Image (spheres, helix red, strand yellow):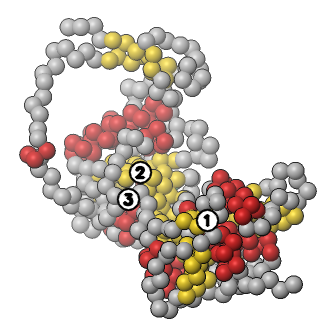
Amino acid sequence: MAKPAVTYACTDCGYSAGRWFGKCPGCNAFGTLVEEVVGATKGKAAQPLLRLVDVKADEAQRISTGVPELDRVLGGGLVPASLVLVGGEPGVGKSTLLLTALAAISKERRALLVTGEESVAQVKLRAERLGGAEQVEILAETELETVCATLEAERPDVCVIDSVQTLYSAEVGSAPGSVAQVREAAARLLRAAKELGVATILVGHVTKDGAVAGPRVLEHLVDCVLQFEGDRYHAHRVLRAAKNRFGSTNELGVFEMTGSGLAGVPDPSELFGRAAGSEVGSAVACALEGTRPILLEIQALVAPTDLAMPRRVATGVDPKRLAMIVAVLGRHARVALGTADVFVNVAGGVRIDEPGADLAVALAIASAARGVPTHEGLAAFGEIGLTGRLRPAAQAERRLEECAKLGLETVVAPADTPPSRPTLTLLQAETLPKAIAAGLAAATG
Ligand SMILES: Nc1ncnc2c1ncn2[C@@H]1O[C@H](COP(=O)(O)OP(=O)(O)OP(=O)(O)O)[C@@H](O)[C@H]1O
Ligand SMILES: [Mg+2]
């Protein structure tokens, strides 16, 4: 038999080389290269091939998690034998969300919670607070081999591992929580999930700087990556998919943290978009999150500054996008902001990445800069181009429908948006200055 080749791989960045280095040439970390034995292919029997036409796949019988918001983000429920990673900062409510889901699943199927983080008694306390989790099976274990052996023996339908960072395999040399350990745990659980048909959900911690063995290294391994966001000081939490092999990545689930657990918010527009309307510096955006339009209140503050580099602070909006909007406002709409700090905030701690929200951000800033409010009951959508022209936004029809549903009266939108709702006044604008003229109440003095 051929001698197996030896390579050295970095446990942090995955750099691999034919010889050992003290300092990884890939990420400059010290002492992270470990020996890896690559097995030779000689002596292995070839596998017969299949044609896709012969493959039997029962069109995924999805498992409902009993949490409609979670189901939607997953793309319609959990796919059996899939591996899902749920990431989020400490205390955001990952354990609460997943225990709620397990409780509902346990009514009809076997649901297992592997807890490495909390004791069985602590989980029991939470379960009592949430209610309905009596049938959930629980295993307090951190040793990877034991967890895999238990999965093989018990074969639950759904298994939650809370958290993947606590799992430890003695076969891997490094400390629990290190990248090597986390990767090993995920790879073994992936195999277990696929072979045993256990839908597995991994909980992973994310730190602000992402430097600690974060779940980022797992993103390519798992089928689905969900991010649970929201800060501790707001009751609202947002769940979104960063990757999904079985559904859209644009879906959004909104929750409210209450004493008895996480309550889904089926109609987030009610909550975030019930905008003051006639307040200076505020505008309502009709943004699209996946298949769902959502109304969001955007607030802006423009304050004079002596700083040579005025501040542009964005919460919930991409800072680059904000810089672009500020520049277009100055250049094409005569809203000069060169000597002012600009702060923009999306109400409720929500984050928007959609260009269709540009126009509302611009309106909020223009309103703050000129000291005049937008018209009462007005929402806006549309992407702003660098020339100051408004570009049509996707799915205008659905956005208008949402605005009409929530009782708004006027919508400012790009020029070729088809008017469709009798109750809505549609103000079409070709350019940003025209949209500002249409959206802002006339300045008095
Ligand atoms: N009795 C309670 N009443 C209301 N809210 C509570 C109560 N107990 C916990 N919470 C909420 O639950 C949150 C913690 O939830 P959970 O333990 O599920 O978070 P987690 O993301 O799993 O945290 P960790 O990363 O530490 O495991 C707290 O931030 C708090 O808002
Ligand atoms: Mg937890």
Foreground of the two, 396 or 419: 419
User: Which one is earlier in the sequence, the residue at label 2 or at label 1?
Assistant: 2
Residue 237 located left or right of residue 124 = right
- Which residue bears the numbered disc 3? 248
Q: What x and y, as percent, mark residue 190? A: 31, 41
- Separation of marks 2 and 1 at Cα, in angstroms: 32 Å
- Which residue bears the numbered disc 1? 389
Q: Quick check: marks 2 and 1 in contact, CB under 8 Å?
A: no
At 55% from the left edge and 84% from the top edge, which residue is drawn? 426
Element at label 3: loop
Q: Identify residue type, mark 3.
A: Ser
Q: Is residue 353 above or below residue 210?
A: below
Assess disc 3: are there few (<14), some (14-19) or many (≥20) residues with their C-alpha within 10 Å of its C-alpha.
some
Element at label 1: loop
Foreground of the two, 138 or 371: 371
Residue 46 located left or right of residue 401 = left
- Which residue bears the numbered disc 2? 243
Residue 28 located left or right of residue 3 = right
Q: What x and y, as percent, mark residue 187? A: 35, 36
Q: Identify residue type, mark 1.
A: Arg
User: Which one is earlier in the sequence, the residue at label 3 or at label 1?
Assistant: 3
* Disc 2 residue lies near ligand 1 with CB under 8 A: no
Q: Identify residue type, mark 2.
A: Lys
